Image: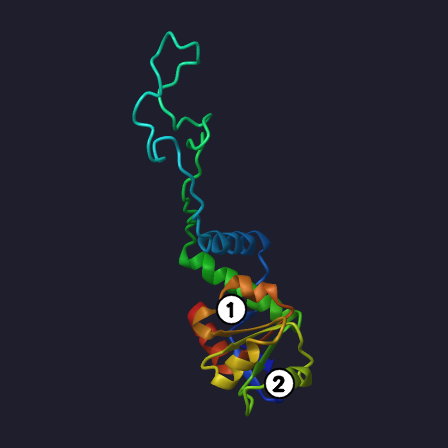
Amino acid sequence: MMDFALSNGESMELDDSVFSAEFNVPLVSQVVQAYLSNGHIGTKAQKSRSDVQGGGHKPWRQKGTGRARAGTSRSPIWRGGGVTFAARPSHRHVKVNRKMYRKAMSCILSELIRQNRLIATTEFDIDAPKTSKLKTSLSNLNLSNCLIVLSSPSQNIQRAASNLKHVELLSSTRLNPVDLIHFENVLMDAEVLRKLGESLS
């Protein structure tokens, strides 16, 4: 077990196997890319010649007109026709097993602790939904570009964080590897940190 200092001067014990893991670059990169790919919604679509309405009859007879033969007015070379290689909705689901995901999260959290970029607090709240109050609270902790992870964020925190640039608020259930590596610092509730240690061990 390792002792981790909280922002109020207290300390809590963390599991070495979870929060002292060696940073595995290929594993973290694979999990992050998979998470981004699975969040991609491939909605791009175009109509091919079979999808365009009309064009069921032959525009003119095959021979004798002096024009090039044509079987449909919805050919890709015609105005109003379909697209030759029409795009279709795509799904880029990449499977990552549970063991890989847990190990990658453990690597990221361990590296944040080693770089002193993870700040844990027993209680973090403001008394009014004011962006200035939240900015002052973060300035007292020397934080500007940070991710705030709370087990049950209050309405004041939610409203204030929505207007503050370079600050994002997440509940513990929405924590993901992409947001963890995106911000310079992570401000986390001590209760969330304890539950992460239990779930990743």
Mark 1: give few (<14), some (14-19) or many (20+) Cα within 10 Å: many
Residue 125 rendering spot, x and y as whole percentages: 54, 87
Residue placed most toward the observer, 64 or 107: 64
Q: Which residue shows up at 51% across the image and 60% down it?
A: 104
Compared with residue 84, is residue 36 higher up or lower down, i.e. above or below?
A: below
- Give left or right: position of 6 versus 104: right
Q: Which residue shows up at 67% across the image and 69% down it?
A: 115
Residue 122 rendering spot, x and y as whole percentages: 53, 87
Task: Looking at the image, tell me whether mark 1 or mark 2 is earlier in sequence order.
Answer: 2
Compared with residue 162, is residue 22 higher up or lower down, i.e. above or below?
A: above
Residue 151 rendering spot, x and y as whole percentages: 46, 80
Q: Residue furthest top?
A: 64
Q: Amino acid at mark 1?
A: Val
Q: Amino acid at mark 2?
A: Ser
Q: Residue furthest left?
A: 56
Instruction: Answer yes or no: is residue 201 visible.
Output: no
Q: Residue 139: which quarter of the image? A: bottom right
Instruction: Answer yes or no: is residue 187 visible.
Output: yes
Q: Residue furthest bottom?
A: 127
Closer to the observer: label 1 or label 2?
2
Q: So how many labels did they put on this image?
A: 2
Circle number at residue 18: 1
Residue 189 rendering spot, x and y as whole percentages: 52, 81
Q: Which residue is mark 2?
A: 7
Task: Answer whether labels 1 and 2 touch (C-beta < 8 Å).
Answer: no
Compared with residue 138, is residue 91 higher up or lower down, i.e. above or below?
A: above
Compared with residue 21, is residue 130 higher up or lower down, i.e. above or below?
A: below
